[in-house]
Image (spheres, rainbow, N blue to C red):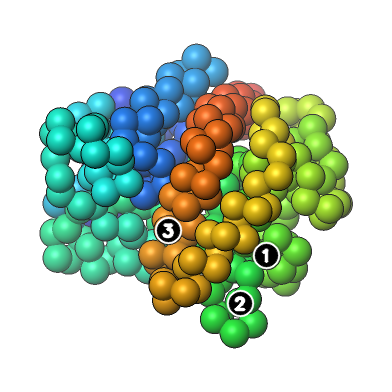
Amino acid sequence: MNVEGIELSAEVAAALAQGQPVVALESTVIAHGLPYPVNVETALAMEAEVRAGGAVPATVGVVGGRAVVGMDEHLITRFGASAWRDTPSAERDVLPSKQTVAKLGARDLAAAVALGQDGATTVGATVRVAALVGIEVMATGGIGGVHRGAAQSWDISGDLTTLARYPVLVVCAGAKAILDIPATLEWLETHGVPVVGWQCTEFPAFYTARSGCRLDFTFERLDDLTRMWQAERAWGGGGVLVVQPPPEELPSVEVAIEAALSRAEALGIRGAAVTPYLLAQVSALTDGKSLDANVKLLKRNAQIAAKIACAIASKKRKN
Ligand code: PSU
Ligand code: MN
């Protein structure tokens, strides 16, 4: 599909034209969610997982005012290197670029395009671009959600509203407990976004399999999940959230989360800066243990997303 302002890599364009499976990947996790150089390695490892699963990866970002679908290694490295502020100083000195790359939610895309800017796309922005070009599946680590204290701050991630609006199936490990998970699930229910478990019965809390929130539906077989997706499409629904637990659990992150939240509060951090700040703090406070868990679950989600994309594509070919 040709959309003004969106540039598909040759590989992604060919795959979409031929009805081959494609998995969209976000770039905010690269530029704002993980430190350099782990972010670049992880982004490339996710792409490798998607390929190993038989699908084509499409990392999305805005470059010079054009949304690129299918960023190459050079671009991914440039975005990753922009996270230099979160990077240990020894690494910082040898980075190829010290330019910062903005964090773009779905609502920021048009302005970034008009002003010719660079920006990393959040889950929400990636979903919006994916839907425009006909990519049905996306993988990420955790989605944004309703923040703790949202009753006062009104801080609810644009990821949720975008998911309610655009038809993309997003695979994630739930949401981090820096968020109010029950409130996030209530929001998704109100706005009609199905949340289903891939081989799990509880909504995962990113670092742990358990959040205390039970899911209404569990899928054990790809075929069933594909039929659910097709029904959602046929019946005019929007996005679907597919959750699976992290491959390795990191217990007792709650202390780090509480500390991160109170620091953010004391520093008066607001808006788009809140999530990246909390992510970096939790990582620092857990001695990088959270980083390792984070990388593993990102790769695992990419793996499952590839399988789902392949199942959807092959079902379409049969119809
Ligand atoms: N949660 C994570 N890691 C991340 C993000 C969220 O565990 O990297 C990023 C994603 O890009 C997500 C964005 O879409 O943060 C949400 O930001 P906000 O809460 O400002 O909407
Ligand atoms: Mn927010």
What x and y, as percent, mark residue 177? 65, 55
Q: Residue 277 carries which label?
A: 3
Numbered circles on residues, count = 3
Callout 1–callout 2 Cβ contact below 8 Å: yes
Q: Does label 3 or label 2 sit earlier along the sequence?
A: 2
What x and y, as percent, mark residue 269? 41, 71
Q: Name the residue under label 2.
A: 150
Q: Name the residue under label 1.
A: 180
Element on which disc 1 rests = loop
Instruction: Name the amino acid, label 3.
Output: Tyr
What x and y, as percent, mark residue 145? 59, 62
Q: What residue is rendered at 21% in x and 61% in y?
A: 113
Cα separation, mark 1 vs mark 2, equals 8 Å
List the single residue furthest toward the bottom.
152
Q: What residue is rendered at 55% in x and 42% in y?
A: 286
In which quadrant of the rendered view does residue 37 lie?
top left
Instruction: Name the amino acid, label 1.
Output: Asp
Q: Residues within 10 Å of mark 2 (few under 14, many from 20)?
A: some
Callout 3–callout 2 Cβ contact below 8 Å: no
What x and y, as percent, mark residue 319? 64, 30
Cα separation, mark 3 vs mark 2, equals 17 Å
List the single residue furthest toward the top.
52
Element on which disc 2 rests = helix
Q: Does label 1 or label 2 sit earlier along the sequence?
A: 2
Q: How crowded is mark 1: few (under 14 residues within 10 Å), some or many (20 or more)?
A: some
For disc 3, does the CB lie below 8 Å from ligand 1?
Answer: no
Cα separation, mark 3 vs mark 1, equals 17 Å
In which quadrant of the rendered view does residue 290 lie?
top right
- Note whether 186 is above or below 26 in the view shown: below
